[in-house]
Amino acid sequence: MAHDTIIVGAGVAGLRCAEELQKAGRRVVVLERSHSVGGRCATRRFQGQAVDFGPMFLHGHQPGFMQALQQVGNAELIRDWPRRIEGNGTPCQPEALRPGVQHITFRAGLKAFPLHLAEKLDVRLETNVVAVRVQPGGFELVAADGMLWPCRDLVLALALEQSLRLLETFPACPEILGFRPLLSMFRSLPCLTLILGYPLESPAVHWDILYPEQSDLLQLVALDSGKRDAPRFGVLVAQARPRWSRQALDSRVPPEEWSEAILDELARLVGPWARHPLWRHPHPWRYARADAASELAQPVQSVFPDGQRLGLAGEIFSPGGGVQAAWTSGTRMAARLLAEERT
Amino acid sequence: MSALDERLQELVERDRDHECKGFGADQVCVRIVAAANLPSRFGDFRIVAFWNNRDQKDHIAIIHGDVIGAEAVPTRLHSECLTGDVLGSLRCDCRDQLEKALVKIGELERGVVLYMRQEGRGIGLANKVRAYALQDRGLDTVEANLALGFRDDERDYAVAAHMVHSLGIASIELMTNNPGKVEQLERYGVKVARRLPHLLPPNPHNRFYLETKAARSGHYIDFSGIPHLQEQSDPVIVEGMAE
């Protein structure tokens, strides 16, 4: 078999797990559905200017995670962003603003972190795994293009709904019996996100992030251009609350329409000028994050009759939330696979 | 005010600006913030409240007799279990374990229960209820229970070790059925003079342990069909039970 372990999902959890397994000498490949790594840890360029549109900053306190962030080369780490926080609304991760928690972002965009993790790894992009078969001594993954990927051990490092969907394709077997009811107890929160470009001089705001208290619609607005060197545009990123996002997604409101609603709300909160951006780009995150009441103690694994193992990792499989939890779950998943490896 | 109370107040004063480099990788530091009498139905105790720099939880030491500077102080580590300790739930044996520890220590010359506020084995009450919900549907598995509980975190031992240190306890006798706990505490510099097994007296609610052989699976179903989930990182041993 060409690979000891296949990891599905090149988000921070999957990449971190792969990194640790590869360091221990395992032959690892990461399969990723989209055209780039990072998952929700996302940055996009608009006429050359980086814009974060997943998390606005990374936060954490665990020494290992903080150290990993510092190892990211030439991305210019920015400490203590956001410095200026406006409004008393709750942040997406309630622990983000607690004392003792560090805040970090990158000049080049947050995606610098997953890109760094992926540097030495074999990551196959645009490889969409649609089904899993249990084989003697391993698993076989079926990609949407018909390619088959055999491996011994398998790690799903996806949003929990996506992991559940792949688990549905497994044959009925006692090994995964407990996984479905367990995962079904949780649900990811959606987040409709609108990226807005303005003339440089126009976003006359005096904060880095606004957490509005009085809005049923918006969770936060970030001045993303504040993180960049010599930006061409003033850029605001507006992220909607989970409930409002869910309603819009469930009733299939088209992006043009929910974008208008966000702009109206933005004008009310920030000023009439915000109603008229030079350009805009909507991004609907269906599985943006785990909610604060959803966290498991550790990643789970199941051993199949021939000793091949299936592991589940990701943000939800570690206490706390956000990118730190994803990273930690990847670390612990790898540690578990290595510690309990049969000889 | 007794001499012990005065010494406890001195510890509160001493800790007002206490700041050390911390215990363990997480650099856990705790302070004694208050101490008071706590007469209870289980004996005569003092309750000592701690602040710590890591979790937002007020851990507690329940002490009996003069433990400050003492050697070989009988010590029990108990993890908070709201359902068992307070509500008398029969889904676990926490209440029995706690009561037994308090009664025992109340009878001795001195002793301490470190009551750690890590509900649901560290991962929270909601997840414990989720684990119960899976049990109710007959869908609980070892993996699900691991994921929904047991964060037998070394940080918890670092907190406990610092608490022992703050109380000026020279060495302890650890009341536990889990030898791993001794090792964990020793790692943080606690002198463990010996381990005392923690035996529960038989009662109508734990009698089934004497007749089950399922000890190895860690899965107990009692006579009324209620599954018992282990909430403490300490296996239950009922007097008369074959280990």
Image (spheres, coloured by chain):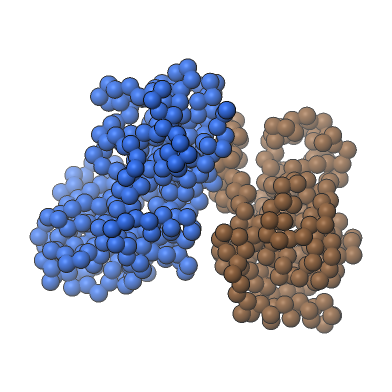
Could one spot residue B40 in this view of the protein?
A: no
Measuring from the top left, give residue A206's x and y in whole percent. 25, 74
Foreground pick, A259 / A168: A168
In the rendered image, which quarter contains the N terminus of chain A?
top left
Foreground pick, A90 / A136: A136
Measuring from the top left, give residue A45's x and y in whole percent. 18, 53
From what the image shows, is residue A309 above or below residue B98?
A: above
Could one spot residue A318 in this view of the protein?
A: yes
Which residue reaches farthest top?
A136
Q: Tell me which residue sits at (22%, 69%) in the image.
A: A270
Q: Tell me which residue sits at (27%, 72%) in the image.
A: A207
Q: Which chain is blue?
A: A
Measuring from the top left, give residue A123's x and y in whole percent. 31, 37
**The image quarter in which residue B114 lies:** bottom right
Judge left or right: residue B132 versus residue A124: right
In the rendered image, which quarter contains the C terminus of chain A?
top right
Total marks in image: 0
Q: Tell me which residue sits at (27%, 36%) in the image.
A: A125
Foreground pick, A86 / A244: A86
Judge left or right: residue A87 versus residue B106: left
Q: Which chain is brown?
A: B
Measuring from the top left, give residue A144's x and y in whole percent. 27, 26
